C-alpha cells in the first residue's frame, strides 16, 4: 500500500487508531531519522492493521470512522503519524501528543540532511527548503522551488541536481509499505491486544490498565480525557501520577478489588460515578498526607499504591454513613500509609498486597486495627532502628522519611532559626538538600578514603532553605556549627545533630553518621507514636522490621568527576538549554524503589520532551549503562561525545525552533 493511499485512508476514516493505543511519543531525532531513511529508500518496516467492522471499532480521537470495514493501526502508528503530520502540515484526527515533534522540518538540498527550522541559521540560505510546504503543494511546489532557485546565480547548473532531490522527497509518498492484516470474527479485543503486545515485545507493552481503559472508552469515549484532566490538575500541585494508577484507584473504590478484570463488568455510568468519588477521596488523601506528614511534592511522595486503599476506606465510610473521619482515625490511617511506604509494602506483588489490605478494611464501623495488625505481622514489627537509616542518595526509601521528620517535627533553618514548615515564601526560601559535611571536603580528604555511599549517606543530609545552603557553602561543621548554635540555640538539635563537638570534625565523620542515625530512628519512633495517640501496641517490641537490601548502581565517584559534571552542566545552560539533574536518582516506576544514580541526566529530554531522555555516565560500570539504556536514556560515557551531540542536534538541530 502506497504511503499516499494510507494518508488518504486516514483522512477518509477508513484507517484509524484503536482506543487502546498510546499517544504519539516520538521526538525530533526520530522524525529526522525516519525521513532520512525514507529519502534514501532504506527499509522502514511494514504495518500491522486490525481489519474490523466500523460499528464495533473503538477508536481514538474525535474523527468519525467510515462505514463498513475499517483498518485500525496496531503497528506503525508513530511512523504514519509522523509522515501524516509532515505531509499534511497538521496532526491526524486521532493524534494525542506534542505536534512540535514534526513541525518545521527542513531539508538542505546540497548536504541532503533533514533539520528543524532555525531562523538564524537558515534565513539566508535558499537551499533549506520547507518539507511540509513542498509535500502539500506537490508538483506545483516543485516547479515554484526550481523557479526561486533560478533567481540565485551562484546555484547555476546545480539546479538540475537539486530538482532530482526535490523529486525524491515528493517520491516518499509513493513508497509502498507492506500492510499485514489481522482479521476474522475470532479476533476479539483481548486477542488483538495480545497480538499487539507480542509484536511490540521489544518496546513498551500494553498494561492490563490499558486494556481496561480501552473497554471503558468503547462505552465512554471521553473517559480518557476526563482522567487525564485530573492527572494534569494533580501535576500542577507537583504530584505526578499516571493513568494506570488512577484507574487502579477507581477500580478499588468501585469494586473493592485490585485486579482490573473486575472493572470490565461495570457500566460507563458506574465508572463515571466512581471516578468522581475516587478523585474526591484522592484529593482528601493528598491533603492529609501533605498537611499532616509534610510529604508535599512528588520527589518525597513514596508509597503511592497505599492511596487506592485509603480512597476505598474513605468511600466505605461515606457509603456506611459513618461521618467525617476524626483526628485519631485520620492519624491511624496516616500511620499505616507511612509505615507501608517506608517498609516497601507495595514494592513486590502490588495487586496481591492491595487486595489483602482491601480485605482488612471491610468492616462497616471504620475499624482500622485489622489493617495495622496485618502490616505488623507482615513486616515483623514497626519500630525503626538506627540501621534502617543506613542508605544513601535521594532515591533511598528512607529519604522521604527524613523529609517527613523535618516537616512533622520542629526542625529549624540554620540561617534564620525559623521552623521549616510548608509554604515558605520567596524562591530563596524553598527547601534544598544540604550535605552537612560538604561533598567537596569529604572527597578531598583522601586519607580517609570516603566512598560515595558514605559521602551521600542519608545521615549526612538535612533540609535547609536555598539561601542558607548557599551561605554555608562548603565549610565544615566544626566551623559553621558553633556559629549556628550561637545565633539560634537549639537549631542544630532540631535537625538531630549530635551535640558532642568532637563528632563535628572530618576524622570522626563515620562516628557522626552512626550517632545521627540513632537520633533519627528515635525521632521517627516518637513521631509514629504521636500518630497513634498513645495506642503504641503497633510499635511494641518484636522482630526487627525487614528491609530488602537495595542494590543501587552508579553515582559520582570523586570530587574531580563532580567538578567536571558541573562544568558540563554550566556549558549546557550557556547554550540556552535546561540544566540537567546532578546525581539523578532513577527509580522503578511501579514500586518507586531506587535502582540507580545517573551522574547527570535530563529525564524529560533536553528539548521539553521533544528529544529522548539523556544521561551522562562517567566512569560507570556496564551494568549502569545497560540499565539507563533499557530505561530509554540516550547515554554518553564521555564529555566530548555529549558535547558533539548537543552541538549537532540541540543547538543546530532545532533548539531555537
Image (spheres, rainbow, N blue to C red):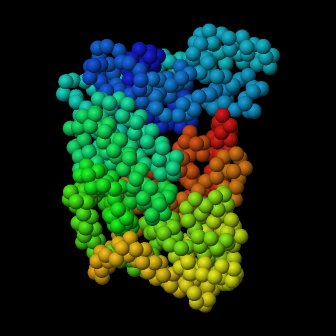
Q: Tell me which residue sits at (67%, 72%) in the image.
A: 415
Front in this rendered view, residue 373 or 469 = 373
Foreground: 67 or 299?
Answer: 299
| Residue 422 position in % (x across, y down) | 55, 61
Q: Is residue 596 visible?
A: no
Front-most of residues 644 and 217: 217
Image spot of residue 455 (x, y percent)? 56, 74
Q: Quadrant of residue 40?
A: top right
Residue situated furthest right in the rendering: 153
Left or right of residue 106, residue 101 in this image: left
Vertical order, 277 against 370 (above or below): above
Residue 537: where, in percent of width, then height?
28, 77
Residue ID at (67%, 18%): 161
Quadrant (top left/top right/bottom left/bottom right) for the C terminus = top right
453 or 281, nearer to the observer:
281
Counting from the top left corner in percent of width and height, residue 35 is at 54, 28
Amino acid at each position: 500500500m502506497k504511503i499516499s493511499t494510507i494518508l488518504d485512508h486516514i483522512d477518509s476514516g477508513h484507517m484509524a487508531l484503536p482506543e487502546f493505543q498510546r499517544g504519539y511519543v516520538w521526538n525530533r531525532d526520530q522524525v529526522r531519522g525516519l525521513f532520512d531513511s525514507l529519502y534514501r529508500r532504506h527499509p522502514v518496516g511494514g504495518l500491522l492493521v486490525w481489519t474490523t467492522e466500523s460499528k464495533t471499532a473503538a477508536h481514538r480521537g474525535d474523527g468519525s470512522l467510515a462505514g463498513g470495514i475499517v483498518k485500525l493501526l496496531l503497528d506503525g502508528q508513530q511512523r504514519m503519524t509522523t509522515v501524516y503530520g509532515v505531509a499534511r502540515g497538521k496532526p491526524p484526527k486521532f493524534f494525542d501528543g506534542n505536534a512540535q515533534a514534526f513541525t518545521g522540518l527542513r531539508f538542505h538540498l546540497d548536504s541532503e540532511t533533514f533539520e528543524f527550522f532555525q531562523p538564524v541559521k537558515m534565513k539566508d540560505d535558499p537551499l533549506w527548503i520547507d518539507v511540509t510546504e513542498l509535500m502539500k503543494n506537490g508538483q506545483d511546489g516543485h516547479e515554484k522551488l526550481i523557479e526561486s532557485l533560478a533567481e540565485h546565480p551562484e546555484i547555476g547548473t546545480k539546479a538540475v541536481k537539486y530538482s532530482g532531490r526535490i523529486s525524491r522527497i515528493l517520491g516518499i509518498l509513493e513508497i509502498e509499505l507492506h500492510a499485514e492484516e489481522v482479521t476474522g470474527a475470532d479476533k476479539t479485543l483481548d486477542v488483538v491486544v495480545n497480538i499487539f503486545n507480542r509484536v511490540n515485545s521489544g518496546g513498551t507493552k500494553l498494561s492490563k490498565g490499558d486494556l481496561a481503559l480501552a473497554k471503558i472508552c468503547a462505552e465512554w469515549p471521553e473517559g480518557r480525557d476526563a482522567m487525564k484532566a485530573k492527572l494534569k490538575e494533580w501535576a500542577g500541585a507537583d504530584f505526578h501520577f499516571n493513568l494506570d494508577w488512577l484507574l487502579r484507584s477507581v477500580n478499588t473504590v468501585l469494586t473493592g478489588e485490585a485486579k482490573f478484570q473486575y472493572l470490565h463488568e461495570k457500566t460507563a455510568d458506574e465508572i463515571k460515578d466512581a471516578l468522581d468519588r475516587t478523585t474526591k477521596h484522592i484529593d482528601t488523601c493528598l491533603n492529609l498526607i501533605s498537611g499532616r506528614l509534610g510529604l508535599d511534592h512528588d520527589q518525597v511522595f513514596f508509597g503511592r499504591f497505599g492511596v487506592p486503599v485509603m480512597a476505598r476506606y474513605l468511600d466505605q465510610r461515606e457509603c456506611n454513613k459513618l461521618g467525617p473521619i476524626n483526628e485519631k482515625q485520620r492519624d491511624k490511617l496516616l500511620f499505616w500509609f507511612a509505615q507501608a511506604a517506608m517498609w516497601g509494602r507495595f514494592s513486590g506483588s502490588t495487586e496481591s498486597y492491595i487486595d489483602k489490605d482491601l480485605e482488612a478494611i471491610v468492616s462497616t464501623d471504620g475499624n482500622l486495627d485489622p489493617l495495622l495488625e496485618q502490616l505488623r505481622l507482615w513486616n515483623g514489627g514497626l519500630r525503626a532502628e538506627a540501621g534502617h537509616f543506613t542508605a544513601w542518595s535521594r532515591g533511598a526509601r528512607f529519604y522521604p522519611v527524613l523529609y517527613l521528620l523535618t516537616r512533622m517535627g520542629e526542625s529549624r533553618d540554620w540561617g534564620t532559626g525559623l521552623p521549616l514548615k510548608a509554604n515558605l515564601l520567596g524562591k530563596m526560601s524553598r527547601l534544598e538538600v544540604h550535605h552537612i559535611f560538604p561533598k567537596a571536603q569529604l572527597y578531598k580528604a583522601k586519607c580517609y578514603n570516603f566512598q560515595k555511599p558514605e559521602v551521600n549517606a542519608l545521615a549526612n543530609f538535612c533540609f535547609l532553605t536555598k539561601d542558607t545552603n548557599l551561605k554555608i557553602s562548603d565549610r565544615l561543621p566544626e566551623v559553621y556549627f558553633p556559629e549556628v548554635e550561637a545565633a539560634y540555640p537549639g537549631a542544630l538539635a532540631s535537625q538531630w545533630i549530635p551535640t558532642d563537638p568532637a563528632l563535628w570534625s572530618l576524622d570522626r565523620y563515620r562516628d557522626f553518621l552512626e550517632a545521627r542515625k540513632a537520633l533519627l530512628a528515635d525521632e521517627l519512633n516518637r513521631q509514629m507514636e504521636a500518630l497513634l495517640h498513645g495506642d503504641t501496641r503497633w510499635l511494641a517490641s518484636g522482630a526487627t522490621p525487614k528491609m530488602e537490601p537495595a542494590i543501587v548502581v552508579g553515582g559520582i565517584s570523586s570530587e574531580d568527576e563532580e567538578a567536571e559534571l558541573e562544568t558540563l552542566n554550566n556549558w549546557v545552560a550557556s547554550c540556552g538549554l535546561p540544566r540537567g539533574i546532578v546525581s539523578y536518582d532513577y527509580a522503578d516506576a511501579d514500586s518507586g524503589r531506587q535502582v540507580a544514580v545517573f551522574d547527570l541526566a535530563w529525564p524529560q529530554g533536553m528539548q521539553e520532551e521533544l528529544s529522548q531522555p539523556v544521561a551522562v555516565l562517567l566512569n560507570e560500570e556496564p551494568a549502569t549503562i545497560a540499565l539507563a539504556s533499557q530505561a530509554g536514556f540516550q547515554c554518553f560515557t564521555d564529555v566530548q561525545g555529549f558535547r558533539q551531540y548537543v552541538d549537532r542536534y540541540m543547538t543546530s538541530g532545532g533548539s531555537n525552533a
